[in-house]
Image (tube, helix red, strand yellow):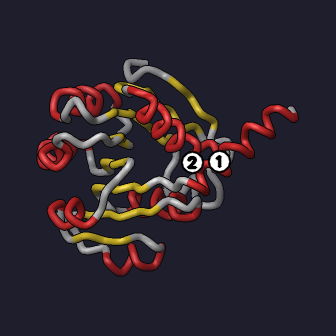
Amino acid sequence: VAQLREVTDQKRVILRERPLSIGIIGFGRFGQFMAERFVKQGAKVAATSRSDYKKEAKAIGVSFAPDLDTLFNDYDFDVIIVSVSILAFADTVKKLSPYLEGKDVLVADVLSVKEHAQQIFLSLLPETCDVLCTHPMFGPESGAESWRGLNFVYERTRVTGAIGVDRVERFLSVFEEEGCAMKDMSCAE
């Protein structure tokens, strides 16, 4: 127990010393819900969406960009989260892909249909991008008070090199710190 507590404390120090820079594509209700926790844990967060959410973003400490051009001209990210509906997912990733050419960044999703997200990511994203398929099995209602004990399912779909592994582990630590029940599971499962 003491050893586990020591490792957990070390992870907290690393997260505070090297905060993640997170971009969220799709800043609707779920994107805002996640962003609020990311900011709480010290991440630098910027977002864009089809609708204008400047006021909502400002209220939770998130920078808001009106479009992808502005988002990628003004910010550099460790992690990009695609938080759009399944109907908009493929088109969104197609539009996002050119902005990621040559960039070493982690791209994650929050769709519940995992094989679809995985297939789209692997077919459309540049090889330089690491891919983490996630399914937070909670939302703004069930996770309003706490994420403690709520399931967070993920698959490290494509992660390369020490920097990629470090970035993925730092990102997953956000959910661990919030008390999620972490479930490493394949997209097919």
Query: Percent x, y for residue 185?
Result: 49, 22
> Is 142 located above or below residue 86 in the figure?
below
Residue that mark 2 sits on: 174
Query: Percent x, y for residue 44?
Result: 45, 63
Residue that mark 1 sits on: 177
Three-letter amino acid code at the position of disc 1: Glu
Q: Residue at x 44, y 37 (%)?
A: 135
Q: Residue at x 12, y 45 (%)?
A: 98
Q: Residues within 10 Å of mark 1 (few under 14, many from 20)?
A: some
Along the line of sight, the residue nearer the viewer: 139 or 123:
123
> Is 35 located above or below residue 122 in the figure?
below
Q: Secondary structure at mark 2?
A: helix
Query: Percent x, y for residue 15?
Result: 59, 51
Q: Are marks 1 and 2 in contact (CB under 8 Å)?
A: yes
Query: Percent x, y for residue 146?
Result: 65, 55
The residue at the far right in this view is 2
Q: Is residue 87 visible?
A: no
Quarter of the image with the C terminus in it: top left
Q: Residues within 10 Å of mark 2 (few under 14, many from 20)?
A: many
Picture quadrant where residue 32 is located = bottom left
Q: Is residue 12 visible?
A: yes
Quarter of the image with the N terminus in it: top right
Asked whether, in this view, residue 128 is left or right of residue 167, the answer is: left
Asked whether, in this view, residue 27 is left or right of residue 9, the answer is: left
> Is 96 located above or below residue 45 in the figure?
above
